[in-house]
Image: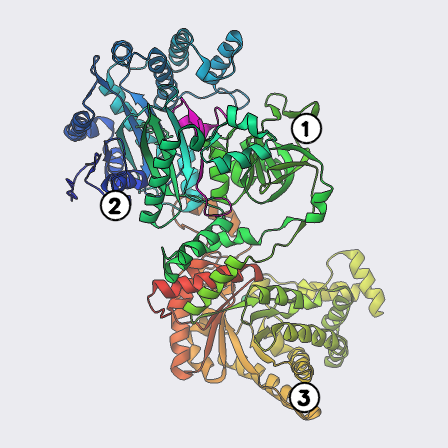
């Protein structure tokens, strides 16, 4: 094997077991290039070629086309010679021509987001020569029409005029099919194909004002530059933004010898997955088309056939095709070309074992010879992600740490989405059947164009097929439905990657973009009509279908349990009600990090007592109202303590400004006045009095407790009494009482006194006691800076990073929407600091707070209760600074458990 990994080079060769690169070199060679090199290294048949590095892309964007070509020419000429030598053909030669493809490929796969041009090197002369050489006129002219089509779109930038228009090339082909009374593009005769070439050329010239260059080298350079340009195309830009990929990565360009799946009945092309990308099942599956080129399968030009017999049977069952017809009309590759299938099966096993992950592969069969054109880690749904990780672990291909690292924490969210209620499905009216391309349940209103996906709150994007331009709309829509394309079509692959419900290839749908309607039989559905999609069965259902909460799968439970063993940092939840607490316990929360008591004051009967308390002018008046509130609060706490079964529960004392509780509308003010037997004017005056210029920095948090200690008294009593009551039932309780918005030591100690005194009183009244902690939130910069002092008294700190971020940046959380978009655009901020913790700034205060706090109180318990507690990169930060726990909303608990384990593994302190 001739293998020499080169240090500084612009091109890297692959093919024929020669390889300059390897799979580790994705940053330089892009994913596609690195894997082509790797496959070549391990003896998989890959057509030879070379990769122009991502650095060259960056160079191109700096110095421009002319200068770059000047620099790059010797390398590319050398690369082409290398390919020519292996293939025994010459690029641009008219007697024995080599044809090339130019393929994009960034370091992370961005399926279909950038461009690729096939069949480069064709012109009138070469076509003639190739006909002589291959004796296959049909193949040559089919390749030529494809070349013009792709070159026209990708390099010369042809596009439909309006979104209602279909692709002009498709239109021309459809017209011809109609005239010839044929259905498939494989049925075109040589004469037809020649006619298409003429028509395509004409339309390209008409629309772009340019001719397709006949010089093969001009073709090669222009195509290469077009691929570099596609790095900054709209699709790629949006995809990058969605995934947070930086723009300086650039794309590599792979120049590769063409192999042809369109040479006749012993040629084919296809896409396959080593496991099921939807369910994660360990079954080899995929689709292929006879006598076709690669793009056809993905673009859904014809509905492809299944590779395996099993897949083919499943497919026929869905399409209600009987076994005899299936075998005759839609045989699997396994049945049709068993030897080649066996070879493919061998490669897929070898490749998966080598990469130790589910692979998504492209292959082409040229006249009975199999070539692999691409492999990459397959996009998958959240369910598949979990199942595949657990299975690979069981199969011994990966270890526990790797299984956990394979989980994208945020993708777990998908597994927690509602599913259709099985009872509602029984009565559902199924209007048509498609392929179960991406599991999930979606109900929404029909839209036909991706850029209109936001027309309704819940929309279902219905398309003949989707294309990469539709990405943004697909992301917005609840579900995606296509009339054409199989399980490996663009729509299916992208939807699975997004974890979005998708039904593809529903051939019974007749979609008319111009009329904005879809017909099934003679029933019409229009834009705005409600439909539902079952991505697990492929059912398309009329109207809405009710949903229910999903259950945690065994596989997910296994991953979560594994995760807990790796990290010492616990996951708690933010829960204000017993229901939330129970939900969070089911997701594995080990305590409550934040119970917001104010939410308990908004109930019907409660708000009245609360308002009375606020409106009271005297301490006694307030006490009277608080006495009414006491039993209600106590009841809530009892429910929460019971739900948490001995896990710690942090309860925050009243925090928001009081004006949030009083009525601002006249009608409500009148009601309140009547209730309280006071004048409307008195109510109004009080409401006015409570108005603040900047309520978030006003009379709130412990400033309330310090001005009205009786509120703290009542809340403490409710907490302690509830704890004693639950303890009496034999349930362990661990209350932690938290003082909000502390900035100075005294603010805390005065509240602490009220809390401890009240607790002591209750204990002696009841002649019983419970252990409890008193601590504080650290959410004001001054508290973090003086944490050593506060920690002498406080038994725990909980970083309230919502307020802390607000105060460190000086941004009001409710107003950032006005300038954040501009800030992203100008690169002032790269993400929302309220979503992922600003480690550089806010993080400094957290570190300081922790260091100072622990310096005077080594036993200090420390956690976080802001939104950041459920965001993976922030969770890693919390781990690194040594927090004891993170707390997040119930549905984020599984995410946080995995993220916490990943943080431990990444920071190499895990021992399990
Ligand atoms: P994408 O990243 O959008 O999948 P690819 O570069 O993989 O783009 O190419 C698009 C299609 O063209 C694929 O189906 C691929 O298999 C096919 N293709 C690319 N290069 C060749 C080649 N040298 N010979 C035959 N088919 C090719
Ligand atoms: Mg590809
Ligand atoms: Mg706060």
Residue 471 seen from this side: no
Question: Which quarter of the rendered image does ligand 3 occupy?
Answer: bottom right
| Residue 566, quarter of picture | bottom left
Q: Is residue 177 above or below residue 24?
A: above
Can you give x and y, in whole percent of width and height, for residue 769 in the image? 63, 89
Check if residue 469 falls in the magenta segment.
no
Q: Which mark is residue 25?
A: 2
Does 194 sit left or right of 558 as displayed? left
- Name the residue tied to disc 3: 762
Q: Which mark is residue 525?
A: 1
Residue plotted at (26% across, 19% down): 121
Would you say the beta carbon of the disc 1 residue lies within 8 angstroms of ligand 1?
Answer: no
**Label 1 secondary element:** strand
| Residue 293, quarter of picture | top left
Q: Which residues are magenta?
A: 277-304
Marks 3, 1: nearer the viewer: 1
Question: Residue 31 versus residue 857: which sits nearer the camera?
Answer: 31
**Marks 2 and 1, the one that precedes in the sequence:** 2
């Amino acid at each position: 094997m001739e293998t020499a990994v080169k240090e500084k080079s612009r091109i890297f060769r692959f093919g024929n077991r020669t390889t300059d690169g390897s799979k580790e070199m994705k940053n330089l060679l892009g994913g596609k290039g690195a894997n082509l090199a790797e496959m070549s290294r391990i003896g998989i048949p890959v057509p030879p070629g070379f990769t122009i590095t991502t650095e060259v892309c960056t160079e191109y964007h700096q110095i421009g086309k002319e200068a770059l070509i000047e620099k790059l020419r010797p390398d590319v000429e050398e690369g082409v010679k290398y390919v020519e030598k292996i293939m025994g053909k010459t690029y641009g030669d008219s007697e024995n021509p080599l044809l090339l493809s130019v393929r994009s490929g960034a370091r992370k796969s961005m399926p279909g987001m950038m461009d690729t041009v096939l069949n480069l090197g064709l012109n009138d002369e070469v076509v003639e020569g190739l006909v002589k050489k291959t004796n296959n006129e049909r193949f040559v002219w089919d390749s030529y029409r494809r070349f013009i089509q792709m070159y026209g779109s990708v390099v010369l930038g042809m596009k439909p005029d309006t979104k209602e228009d279909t692709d002009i090339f498709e239109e021309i082909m459809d017209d011809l099919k109609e005239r010839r009374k044929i259905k498939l593009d494989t049925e075109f005769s040589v004469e037809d194909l020649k006619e298409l070439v003429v028509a395509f050329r004409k339309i390209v010239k008409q629309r772009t004002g340019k001719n397709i260059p006949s010089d093969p080298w001009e073709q090669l350079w222009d195509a290469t530059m077009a691929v570099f340009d596609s790095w900054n195309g709209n699709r790629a830009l949006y995809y990058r933004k969605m995934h947070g990929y930086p723009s300086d990565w650039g794309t590599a360009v792979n120049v590769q010898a063409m192999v042809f799946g369109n040479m006749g009945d012993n040629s084919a092309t296809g896409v396959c997955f080593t496991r099921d990308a939807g369910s994660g099942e360990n079954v080899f599956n995929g689709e292929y088309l006879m006598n076709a080129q690669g793009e056809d399968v993905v673009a859904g030009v014809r509905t492809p056939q299944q590779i395996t017999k099993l897949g083919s049977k499943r497919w026929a069952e869905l399409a209600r095709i009987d076994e005899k017809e299936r075998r005759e009309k839609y045989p699997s590759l396994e049945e049709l070309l068993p030897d080649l299938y066996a070879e493919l099966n061998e490669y897929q096993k070898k490749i998966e074992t080598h990469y130790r992950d589910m692979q998504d592969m492209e292959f082409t069969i040229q006249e009975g010879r199999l070539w692999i054109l691409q492999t990459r880690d397959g996009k998958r749904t959240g369910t598949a992600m979990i199942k595949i990780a657990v299975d690979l672990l069981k199969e011994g291909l990966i270890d526990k740490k790797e299984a956990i690292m394979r989980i994208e924490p945020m993708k777990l969210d998908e597994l927690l989405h509602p599913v259709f209620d099985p009872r509602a499905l029984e009565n559902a009216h199924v209007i048509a059947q498609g392929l179960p391309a991406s599991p999930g349940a979606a109900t929404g209103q029909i839209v036909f164009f991706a850029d209109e996906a936001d027309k309704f709150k819940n929309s279902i994007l219905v398309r003949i097929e989707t294309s990469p331009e539709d990405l943004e709309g697909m992301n917005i829509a609840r579900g995606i439905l296509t009339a054409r394309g199989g399980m490996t079509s663009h729509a299916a692959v992208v939807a699975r990657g997004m974890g979005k419900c998708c039904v593809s290839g529903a051939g019974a749908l007749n979609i008319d973009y111009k009329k904005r309607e879809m017909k099934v039989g003679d029933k019409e559905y229009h834009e705005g009509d409600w439909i539902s999609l079952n991505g697990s069965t492929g059912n398309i259902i009329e109207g809405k279908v009710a949903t229910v909460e999903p259950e945690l799968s065994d596989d997910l439970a296994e991953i979560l349990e594994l995760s807990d063993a790796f990290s010492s940092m616990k996951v708690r939840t933010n829960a204000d009600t017993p229901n939330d607490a129970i939900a969070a316990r089911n997701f594995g929360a080990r305590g409550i990090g934040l119970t917001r008591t104010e939410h308990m004051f908004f109930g019907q009967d409660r708000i009245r007592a609360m308002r009375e308390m606020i409106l009271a002018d005297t301490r006694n008046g307030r006490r009277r109202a608080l006495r009414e509130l006491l039993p209600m609060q106590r009841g809530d706490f009892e429910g929460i303590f019971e739900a948490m079964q001995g896990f710690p529960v942090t309860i925050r004392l009243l925090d928001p400004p009081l004006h949030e509780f009083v009525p601002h509308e006249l009608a409500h003010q009148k009601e309140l006045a009547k209730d309280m037997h006071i004048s409307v004017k008195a109510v109004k005056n009080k409401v006015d009095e409570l108005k603040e210029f900047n309520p978030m920095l006003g009379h709130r948090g412990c400033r309330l407790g310090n001005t009205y200690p009786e509120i703290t008294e009542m809340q403490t009593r409710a907490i302690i009494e509830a704890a004693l009551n639950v303890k009496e039932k034999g349930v362990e309780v661990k209350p932690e009482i938290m003082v909000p918005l502390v900035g100075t030591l005294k603010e805390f100690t005065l509240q602490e006194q009220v809390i401890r005194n009240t607790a002591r009183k209750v204990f002696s009244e009841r002649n019983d006691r419970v252990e409890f902690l008193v601590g504080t939130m650290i959410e004001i910069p001054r508290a973090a800076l003086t944490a050593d002092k506060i920690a002498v008294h406080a038994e725990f700190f909980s970083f309230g990073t919502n307020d802390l971020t607000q105060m460190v940046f000086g941004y009001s959380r409710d107003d950032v929407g006005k300038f954040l978009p501009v800030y992203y655009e100008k690169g002032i901020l790269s993400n929302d600091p309220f979503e992922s913790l600003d480690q550089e700034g806010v993080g400094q205060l957290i570190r300081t707070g922790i260091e100072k706090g622990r310096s005077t109180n080594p036993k200090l318990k420390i956690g976080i209760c802001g939104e950041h507690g459920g965001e993976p990169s922030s969770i890693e930060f919390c781990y690194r600074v040594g927090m004891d726990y993170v707390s997040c909303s119930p549905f984020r608990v599984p995410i946080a458990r995995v993220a916490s384990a990943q943080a431990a593994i990444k920071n190499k302190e895990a021992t399990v």
